[in-house]
Amino acid sequence: MVLDNKTKKYLKIICLVLFVAVLTGCTQNLDSSGQLIKGRGITLNTPWTFSKGWFDFLLVIPIAKGILYLGDSLLGNVAIGVVIVTIIINIITLPIMIKSTVSTQKMQLIQPEIEKIQRKYQGRKDQTSQMRMSSEIQNLYKKHDISMMSSFATFLTLPIMLAMWQAVQRIQILYQTTFFGFNLGDKPMDHIFKFDIAYILLLVVVAATQFFAMKINEIMAKRNPRYRPSQQMKSMNMMNNFMTVFIIYFAAIMPSAMSLYWITTNIINVVRTWYIYVHHVERAQKEVDQADTNYLTKRQNK
């Protein structure tokens, strides 16, 4: 893939923003026993000031207070607030996800054409040839209305998701809350060894929803008759399987509140991906096919 200087500049900025967000957002909130560290908890009375850090001020504290207000103050159970705010955040970020997913899918559809251009200039390392190759690829993107930045737009949502993750961990009252018979402050691992079927089922639900959240892209992509599994897809499947095991492990050793968050997020991801593919990606596939047909028709009429 050939990127112009403007795109490379934007990518560097995005990487820098993400790097800073991770550094500021990954402060440890729970001790080795899974208890909230003193001073890290957030309540409705927690001061909303820059003294807590810009990441907390802009994202974590507002999200946590929103959860507390909706769940604890209005609905009487802070766990419901976690579910509602998770849904709200995913609705807010939906336009970004739609644009990114559609652009990525279009790029996959035109990959054979990109490879054809690259083969055309294979072995030609002079600056003129490289510029021509870059120009032809950019024209291909333009023909199919593909924005390179849209493919990377998903990364812009990561600080928000990280803030949500932080907020759930730091809501103090959440660890004393009961939801559907689960004590959200208890770790499933402590109950599994006691053969508590409720917490075993909780982990099974985490595993099932995580698996489908990771597989839904592949499942929906197979609806396309032109779908061909690639080596990249196989590598992605291996990584997804690793991530599923990784999250199940953390769900077992962390308070059940995090399992609630994961289950909610996974279900939303499945529904969101289905919606994007059915209502946006498949329409984009038709647009790519139509653009190819129009291009061939013009060439034949010349």
Image (spheres, rainbow, N blue to C red):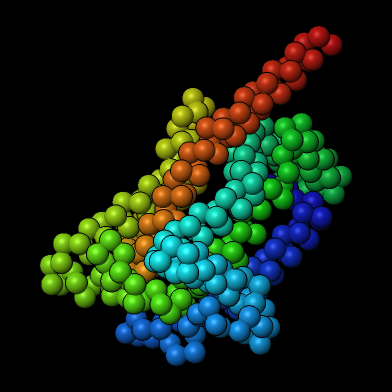
Give the x, y percent position of residue 201: 22, 58
Q: Nearer the viewer, residue 66 or 265?
A: 66
- Left or right: residue 9 compared with residue 84: right
Quarter where residue 136 is shown: top right
Placement of 148 over or under 207, stated as above or below: above
- Left or right: residue 180 compared with residue 45: left
Which residue is drawn at the image coordinates 43% and 87% (left, top)? 37
Which residue is drawn at the image coordinates 44% and 69% (left, top)? 72
Which residue is drawn at the image coordinates 47% and 69% (left, top)? 73
Give the x, y percent position of residue 251: 33, 67
Placement of 117 over or under 4, stated as above or below: above
Quarter where residue 34 is shown: bottom left
Q: Nearer the viewer, residue 125 or 104?
A: 104
Placement of 152 over or under 44, stated as above or below: above
In which quadrant of the rendered image does the C terminus lie? top right
Which residue is drawn at the image coordinates 55% and 55% (left, top)? 88
- Left or right: residue 211 compared with residue 82: left
Placement of 280 over or under 157, stated as above or below: above
Q: Nearer the viewer, residue 8 or 203?
A: 203
Give the x, y percent position of residue 292: 69, 22
Quarter where residue 135 is shown: top right
Farthest top residue in view: 301
- Left or right: residue 202 compared with residue 135: left
Count of number-bearing discs: 0
Residue 163 seen by the camera? no
Give the x, y percent position of residue 48: 63, 80
